[in-house]
Image (cartoon, coloured by chain):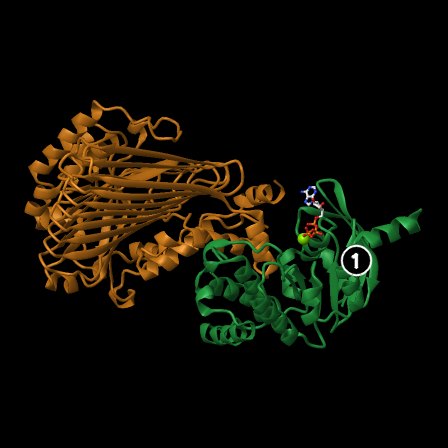
Chain colours: A green, B orange
Amino acid sequence: MLSIKNLHAAIEGTPILKGISLEIKPGEVHAIMGPNGSGKSTLASVLAGREEYEVTEGEVYFKGKDLLDLSPEDRAREGVFLAFQYPVEIPGVSSTNFLRTAVNQVREYRGQEPLDAVKFLSLMKEKMKLVEIDQKLLSRALNEGFSGGEKKKNEIFQMAVLEPTLSILDETDSGLDIDALKVVANGVNQLKTKENATIVVTHYQRLLDYIIPDYVHVLFDGRIVKSGSKDLALELEDKGYDWIKEEISGTTV
Amino acid sequence: MSKDNEILEEFTSKEYEHGWSVDYEADEAPIGLTEDTIRWISSKKEEPKWLLDWRLKAFRHWETMDEPTWPNVKYPKIDYQALRYYSAPKQKSKPSNIDEVDPELLKIYDRLGISLNEQKRLQGIAVDAVLDSVSVGTTFKDTLSKLGVVFCSFSEAVKEHPDLVKKYLGSVVPSTDNYFAALNSAVFSDGSFCYIPKGVRCPMELSTYFRINAANTGQFERTLIIAEDKSYVSYLEGCTAPQRDENQLHAAVVEIYAAENAEVKYSTVQNWFPGDKNGKGGIYNFVTKRGICAGNHSKISWTQVETGSAVTWKYPSCILKGDHSIGEFYSVAVTNNYQQADTGTKMIHIGKNTRSRIVSKGISAGKSQNSYRGQVQVMKRATDARNFSQCDSLLMGDRCGAHTFPYIDIHNSSAKVEHEATTSKIGEDQIFYCNQRGISSEDAVALIVNGYAKEVLNQLPMEFAVEAQKLLALTLEGSVG
Ligand SMILES: Nc1ncnc2c1ncn2[C@@H]1O[C@H](COP(=O)(O)OP(=O)(O)OP(=O)(O)O)[C@@H](O)[C@H]1O
Ligand SMILES: [Mg+2]
C-alpha cells in the first residue's frame, strides 16, 4: 500500500532524512522508534506533504499513486491521516464544524454526496463512543485550551471519523494518562481492518503492549538502521539506543 | 516565509462580484459644488426653506474646514469641484408604491439578489433601496404603518413628517461636526428614515440597501433612526458599487436617537468596490455614524462587517447620556490588496452607571493597512461607568499592517476601563493542519477567519450572518493555492 524508496529530505538546506526505504502492506502495523531528533516527525511530515520539507531524492507510492505528486489535501483525501505530535489550535472553530467541512471535502473528492447535518451527527455520535470522548469537548473551539491528553484523544477521534487507509500516529501516547492510553489504543485497534495500515511513532514500549506491531523500525540520523519484530521494542526499552549506535559504527568502520 | 508568501501572491485573483453597472436615464446635477448646486438639489427635491437654509449653513461651514489628515490612510487629494453631487434614475412618474417602480430599476436590485417585490421578499425584512442619490422604493410599508412605524426614504419623510425631521436632523451629528459630515449635510440626496413609536417592538428587520451606479457621482445618504420610549428596532444596511477605474466618494451620515428604555441594533455589511488588485479604483468610504442613548436604560449596538472600499474612515459611536445606558460596538474589518481602513468607535460616558463594550477584529492581507482607532471617554458625572475593549488583529502574510490607536480619557475616578489587544498571524501550521484533514487551503482560510470573527458575526441577524461569512471568505478567496 505504501512504498518508500530511498527517501531523502531536507529543511532549509539541512538534510534530515538520508535514504529511507519502507514497504507497508494492508493490515499491517509498523512501529517507528528512535532517539530525539532522529527524523521521525520529519518522515511523518514529508508523507503528509508539509511544504517546508524538500524531497531531494527517492520516491513514495501510495496505493499505486505517486504520493509526492499530490497536494497535502489530496493526500488526506486519498486516505493518509497524520495524528500530529503537536495538534494545532484553531480559535473560534468548533471541532464539529471543522470535521464536517473535512468529511464533506473528502467525500466530494471521492464523488460521494455530502453528509447532511443529521447523518453527520449520527456518525459523530458513533465515533465518540469508540474513543470515549466527551461531547462538550467537541462543541468547544478546536483544540483551544485542550489539555495535552485531550488534544491527542481528539486526533484519534478525527481519525475515527475520517476512516483513513494509512494512519500515522506521531507520539500519540505522550501526554496520555494510563486510562487514556488504553482508550486510544483500543480505538486504534477497533479501527483496524484488513485494508488499512498504521504507522506508530513512539518512544515507549508501553503503547506497543496495546497496539501490537508487526514490525519495529529504528530510525537513527535519518536512516532506518534496524528492523525487527515487536521484541526489538522490548530490547530497546531494556538497553536504550547506545548498543545500536555501536552496532552501526561497528559495521561502517 | 514560503507558504505565507504564496498566500500573499495569490491574493490577487478574486474579482469583485458586484462590479457591473447599468445604463439608465438619469437626472443629474451639473458637476461641481457651489451654493447653486445646493439650491439645485433642494429645489429638485421640493424641499422647505428651513432645510435649504440648514444645507447652506452646513456648506458655508464646510468651506472653512480642512479635510482631516489624522487618519492612518493615504489617498490622492479629492477634487470636490470635479464631482457630481446628485444623480437620480429618471422615473416616468413618481412611484407611490413599489409596484409602480420602473421595472428596469427593480432589475438592478434583482441582480444583487435583493427582491423588492413584497411577495418574494424574505420573510420579515422590510427594505428601502437607494440607488445613487435617491430611494427607489420601500417594501412592507403598510404592515409597518399599522403599528405606527415609519420607514421610508428621507425625502419622503421631509414631506410627510417634517416636524420629526426638523426636530432630530443634526441633533446627534451636527452639520458642523466634521469635514465629511458637513459636506453630507450640504448635499445629502436621500437615505432612509425610521421612526418607532413608544412601546413598539418593530416586528421585522428594517433594511436599507445602497448602491452607487452612476460614474463620477458621490453618494451622500442620510439615515435617521428615532426610537421612542421602550421601543426596539433592528436595522440592517448593505452596500455595493460597480467596478470603475476612478475612485468614488461615499460620505454618509447616520444618526440614531434612543429614548428611555429604547434599544436600537444597527448592523452593516459594507461591500463597496475595494479597487482592483493593483489598488486602482474603489470607493472612498468616509462615514459618520453616531447614536445617542438619550434616555435612561437605553441601548445602542453597532455591528459592522467591513469588507469593501479602497479607503474606509468610519467610527460608529455612542453618546451614553442616559443613566444606565449601554453602548456596544462589534466590528470585523477585512483589508486586502491595497485597501486601507481606519475604523473604530467612540464611547462617551456621560450618565451614571453607563456601560460600553468594544469588540474589534481586524484582518489584513495583501499590502493593505488596517487600523483600529477607538476612544473611551468618561465624563465627570458618569459615576461607575464601565468599558471593556477587545481589539484583535489577524495578519496574513508580511506585507500588510495592523495598527491600534486606543485613546482613553477619564474624568471620574470610579470608572473601570479595560483594554485588551492581540495580534496574531494565520499560521502555516493551521492551514497545514486543515489540509491534512482534506480541507483545501482556501476553505481553511475561510474557516480560520470566520472562527476568528465569530464573536462579531454572532451579533448579526441570521440571514446577514450567513451573507457576511460568505463575504469574508470571498474577500480572501484566491489567497492560497
Ligand atoms: N527548520 C529547521 N532547520 C534545521 N533543522 C531542523 C528544522 N526543523 C527540524 N530540524 C531538525 O530535524 C531533525 C529531525 O527532527 P524531527 O522532529 O523529525 O525529530 P523526531 O525524531 O521526531 O524527534 P522527537 O523524538 O524529539 O519528536 C532535528 O534535529 C531537528 O532539529
Ligand atoms: Mg517528533
Residue extending farthest front? A238
Quarter of the image with the N terminus of chain B in it: top right
- x and y percent of residue B168 in the render? 11, 43
Residue located 26% across and 24% down the image: B66
Residue located 38% across and 57% down the image: B467
Above or below for B350 versus B81:
below
Residue extending farthest left? B163
Residue under label 1, please give it: A239
- x and y percent of residue A3 in the render? 79, 63
Q: Chain of mark 1?
A: A
Above or below for A201 versus B372:
below
- x and y percent of residue B70 in the render? 33, 27
SS class, disc 1: helix
- A249 and A78: which is toward the camera: A249
The image quadrant of residue B353 is: top left
Above or below for B69 versus B236:
above
- A90 and B288: which is toward the camera: A90
Q: Amino acid at mark 1?
A: Lys
Residue located 18% across and 33% down the image: B38
Using the rendered image of the protein, determine whether residue B252 is visible from the camera's viewpoint.
Answer: no
The image quadrant of residue A239 is: bottom right
Would residue A31 be found to the left or right of residue A175 on screen?
Answer: right
- x and y percent of residue B427 in the render? 54, 47
The image quadrant of residue B342 is: top left
